């Protein structure tokens, strides 16, 4: 079976990196999802898609995949650009150019 190993990005709803420290091993889907005719929900008969294992390090996840004989693909961490620091006081600078106000 094919698995992917990655480190998830932090969600937009949190300011810290609490759930983004662990490495995750997920199985690739083998059966496509199909929509339920009545409710419109997506579902699949593939139970392996529900398995999500967390590891402290990338090496632990790779060792587990090798030990179980799984084909794996490792995705590196996404790098973030540093955000320019903005100060609240800059909104009231005297040399700030504003158009449309008289």
Image (cartoon, grey):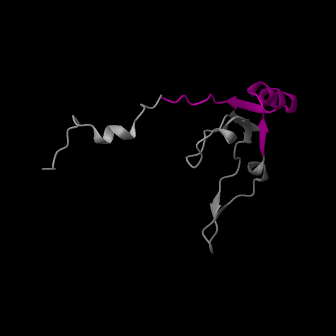
The boundaries of the magenta stretch are 52-81
Residue at 45% x, 32% y: name it: 83
- Residue 59, by quadrant, is top right
Which one is in front, 7 or 36?
Answer: 7
Task: Pinpoint residue 43: horizontal percent, then vertical percent.
Answer: 68, 61
Residue 62: in magenta span: yes
Q: Quadrant of residue 76?
A: top right
Indicate left or right for 90 with 40 as reference: left
How many numbered tags mark residues here?
Answer: 0
Residue at far top of view: 59
Q: Which residue is farthest bottom?
A: 38
Along the line of sight, the residue nearer the viewer: 51 or 71 = 51
Task: Name the residue furthest right.
Answer: 67
> x%, y% of residue 79?
54, 28
Quadrant for the N terminus, please. Answer: top right
Say whether residue 88 is magenta: no
List the single residue furthest toward the left.
102
Residue 102 in the image: above or below residue 96: below
Above or below — where is 92 with respect to 70? Answer: below
Of residues 48 and 19, the one nearer the viewer is 19
Q: Residue at x 12, y 50 (%)?
A: 102
Where 1 sits versus 57, above or below? below
Where residue 94 appears, x then y in whole percent? 23, 37
Q: Please tell me which residue lies in front, 60 or 46.
A: 60
Look at 81% across and 28% down and name the residue there: 60
Determine whether, in the image, residue 20 is placed left or right of residue 82. Answer: right
């Amino acid at each position: 079976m094919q698995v992917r190993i990655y480190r998830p990005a932090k969600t937009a709803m949190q300011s810290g990196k609490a759930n983004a420290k662990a490495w995750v091993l997920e199985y690739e889907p083998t059966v496509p999802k199909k929509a339920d005719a009545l409710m419109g929900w997506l579902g699949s008969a593939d139970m392996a898609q529900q398995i999500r294992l967390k590891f402290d390090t990338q090496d632990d996840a790779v060792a587990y995949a090798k030990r179980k004989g799984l084909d794996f693909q490792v995705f590196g961490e996404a790098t973030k650009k540093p955000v320019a620091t903005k100060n609240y006081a800059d909104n009231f600078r005297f040399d700030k150019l504003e158009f449309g106000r008289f």
